[in-house]
Amino acid sequence: MLDADFFRRWMTVTAASVDREAERLTALDSAIGDADHGTNMQRGFRAVAASLEKEAPDTPGEVLTHAGRQLISTVGGASGPLYGTLLRRTGKALGDATEVSEAQLAEALRAGVDGVMALGGAAPGDKTMLDALVPAVDAMPDGFAAARAAAEEGALATVPLQARKGRASYLGERSIGHQDPGATSSALLIAALVEAAGE
Ligand code: ADP
Ligand code: MG
């Protein structure tokens, strides 16, 4: 079972991994966007980690809704409200249980991903974070490591796609041949589940 400590670890491991990869995320965004995805994610997840240190929400659902609110209020780019919605909706779906199963988390993440689709109007194949998140959620019944592999594969598979949503879509065919920054950061978020679980 996964408790509030696990969810706090998930967020702090994500923050550390975003810190390590920030330059790479920004470099990816400089090819097909405005070169701010690394700094956006860094600002957002540093705020999440700092606020979880100050306040210690005591249920899994509260940890995620709290983190989502931080992302929405600190990140200016499109990714702030989108990741914020992902975490808030996932947190809400977990309800007020003090411990949840991996299956419950998978189901809640599905609700979170639906929230991202509703907010941004994108679908898998549009070269966005959803190209990593949707395969990850689909693979989650096979465990976190399977979800991580699916997310990483999904992020790599954005390279040949033409962007149909977000800033990269303004480039039309010139968006082809580059990995999507948001799909790349989503793969970091999913990989952090494995580390948080100590697998
Ligand atoms: P901005 O595009 O405002 O500069 P970021 O650079 O932080 O914001 O984030 C860009 C990422 O956000 C993209 O790589 C993509 O994965 C994701 N994204 C953009 N628009 C959408 C959308 N409508 N739905 C889902 N993800 C999106
Ligand atoms: Mg950007």
Image (cartoon, rainbow, N blue to C red):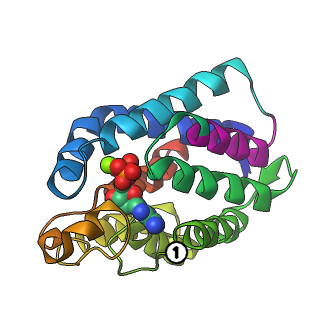
In the image: residue 174, left or right of residue 131: left
On the image, the x and y values in percent for residue 162 come to 23, 78
Residue drawn 20% across and 52% down? Answer: 28
Across and down, in percent, residue 30 comes to 18, 48
Decide if residue 93 is in sight here: yes
- Within 8 Å of ligand 1, the CB of disc 1? yes
Confirm whether the magenta stretch covers residue 70: yes
Considering depth in this image, is 127 or 108 the residue closer to the camera?
A: 127
Tell me if residue 199 can be seen.
Answer: no
Q: Which amino acid, by three-letter code, is at mark 1?
A: Gly
Q: Residue at 43% across / 69% down in the picture? A: 146
Which quadrant of the view contains residue 181? bottom left
User: With 140 as the anchor, is 130 left or right in this view?
Assistant: left
Give whichever of 139, 118 is nearer the camera: 118
Across and down, in percent, residue 121 comes to 52, 75
- Number of residue marks: 1
Q: Which residues are magenta?
A: 58-72
Looking at this view, name the residue that lies furthest to the top: 54
Which residue is the extreme one toward the right? 96
In the rendered image, residue 82, in percent from the top left (x then y), is placed at: 53, 56
**Is 71 located above or below residue 78 in the figure?**
above
Quarter holding the N terminus is bottom right
Asked if residue 100 lies left or right of residue 117, the reply is right
Asked which secondary structure carries label 1, the reply is: loop
Where is mark 1, residue-wise? 121
Magenta-span inclusion, residue 34? no
